[in-house]
């Protein structure tokens, strides 16, 4: 390796939202957190899990949740999408 062209590496601890931690090397000189890791991602666990990083489900429920609840109260199924 050439000298003085590589950034300094620091040993950091990465903490996942599931609680799993991993020690690794990074040019970032502080510990940081992540939202998903190989210990909790459905691809690795084999269990289906809803990953809603952009808040899309919450947004949908906010927009249509009350409407669906009202429809259920009237004893109807959620109305089909009009074409
Ligand atoms: Zn995790």
Image (cartoon, grey):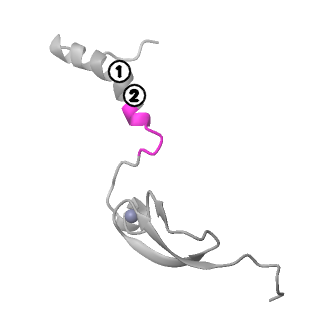
Which residue is depicted at the point 46% across and 62% down? 33
| x then y, percent, for residue 25 | 58, 78
Residue 62 to residue 18: above or below: above
Quadrant of image for the N terminus: bottom right
Label 1 packing within 10 angstroms: few (<14), some (14-19), many (20+): few
Which residue is depicted at the point 19% across and 17% down? 72
Viewer-proximal residue among 8 and 42: 8
Residue 9 to residue 31: above or below: below
- Mark sitting on residue 3: none
| x then y, percent, for residue 12 | 52, 75
When asked about the image quadrant of residue 37, the answer is bottom left
Q: Mark 1 highlights which residue?
A: 64
- Image quadrant of ligand 1 equals bottom left
Q: Is residue 67 left or right of residue 32?
A: left
Q: Mark 2 highlights which residue?
A: 60
Say whether residue 60 is magenta: no
Viewer-proximal residue among 50 and 37: 37
Which residue is depicted at the point 47% across and 78% down? 23
Query: In what element is the residue under mark 2?
Result: helix
| x then y, percent, for residue 79 | 31, 15
Query: What whole-number distance in Å separates the C-alpha atoms at marks 2 and 1?
Result: 6 Å
Q: Which residues are magenta?
A: 52-58
Asked whether residue 4 appears in the rendered view, the answer is yes
Query: In what element is the residue under mark 1?
Result: helix
Q: Are the residues at dot 2 and dot 1 in contact (C-beta closer than 8 Å)?
A: yes
Q: Is residue 42 left or right of residue 68?
A: right
When asked about the image quadrant of residue 59, the answer is top left
Label 2 packing within 10 angstroms: few (<14), some (14-19), many (20+): few
Which residue is depicted at the point 43% across and 60% down? 36
Residue 35 to residue 10: above or below: above
Say whether residue 57 is magenta: yes
Q: How many marks?
A: 2
């Amino acid at each position: 390796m050439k000298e003085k062209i590589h950034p300094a590496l620091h040993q950091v601890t990465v903490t996942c939202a599931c609680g799993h931690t991993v020690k690794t090397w990074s040019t970032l000189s502080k510990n940081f957190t992540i939202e998903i890791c190989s210990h909790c991602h459905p691809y690795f666990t084999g269990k289906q899990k809803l990953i809603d990083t952009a808040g899309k489900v919450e947004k949908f429920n906010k927009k249509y949740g009350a409407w669906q609840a009202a429809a259920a109260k009237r004893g109807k199924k959620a109305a089909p999408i009009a074409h």
